[in-house]
Amino acid sequence: MKFKILLFAGFLSFIASTYAQDMNKKYLDPKIEKQVLIGYCDTIGLQEGVFGVYYKTQFEIYQPKLSIVKKIDAIIVKGGFEVVTIFGDWCSDSKLQVPRFYKLLSEMNFSLSNSKLIAVNGSKKAQSLDISKYKILRIPTFIIYFNGEEIGRIVESPDNTLEKDLLKILKTID
């Protein structure tokens, strides 16, 4: 019995380490001649390097309007929501908007297990990860899903504020 438990624990460790190796990968982008994040990332990856300086600064200074955050919370409490963020750590709009969006998510108590964060290169490709289904034209792009269906996007910069734009998107299903 102990052997089975140890074998299972070893298998889980192997799976976790394999998954971790696919997160926060970096490579030299020949188009912009810089090392960039590529593929799936997490918030730890966002806080590293030059992008991390922008991330920490913007995350700290951005203050979403709490009255709007409460309205968003009243909708997302129903569940079924997912967010896909596609960004470039080399992109000035991403340096500004991604940290702010993740600050908004943290204020909403949105579970990051319901989000995907994908970094792209200067050609808006994620290397070996096929992102064509997302139809990305500009970055960052925040795609909001409800029960697996896309209900809206915030592209590059919000029309108003991130929280107002997100609330407008969420109201389409309310």
Image: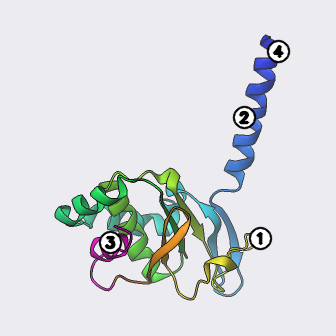
At label 3, the amino acid type is Lys
At label 2, the amino acid type is Ser
The Cα–Cα distance between marks 3 and 4, rounded to whole angstroms, is 53 Å
Q: Point out the frontmost of discs 2 and 3.
A: 3
Tell me residue 41's x, y (percent). 59, 60
Residue 162 counted in the magenta span: yes
Tell me residue 91's x, y (percent). 50, 81
Q: Residue at x 52, y 64 (%)?
A: 49
The residue that disc 4 covers is: 3
The Cα–Cα distance between marks 1 and 4, rounded to whole angstroms, is 37 Å
The Cα–Cα distance between marks 2 and 3, rounded to whole angstroms, is 42 Å
Image quarter hosting the C terminus: bottom left
Mark 2 nearby-residue class (10 Å; few <14, some 14–19, many ≥20): few
Mark 3 nearby-residue class (10 Å; few <14, some 14–19, many ≥20): few
The residue that disc 2 covers is: 13
Q: Point out the frontmost of discs 1 and 3.
A: 3
Tell me residue 151's x, y (percent). 46, 74
The Cα–Cα distance between marks 2 and 4, rounded to whole angstroms, is 15 Å
The residue that disc 3 covers is: 171
Q: Give, as a single range, the part of the protein colored magenta.
A: 159-174
The Cα–Cα distance between marks 1 and 3, rounded to whole angstroms, is 35 Å
Residue 44 counted in the magenta span: no
Element at label 1: loop
Residue furthest to the front in view is: 174
At label 4, the amino acid type is Phe
Q: Which mark is residue 128?
A: 1
Element at label 2: helix
At label 1, the amino acid type is Ser
The Cα–Cα distance between marks 2 and 1, rounded to whole angstroms, is 24 Å
**142 horizontally vs 36: left or right:** left
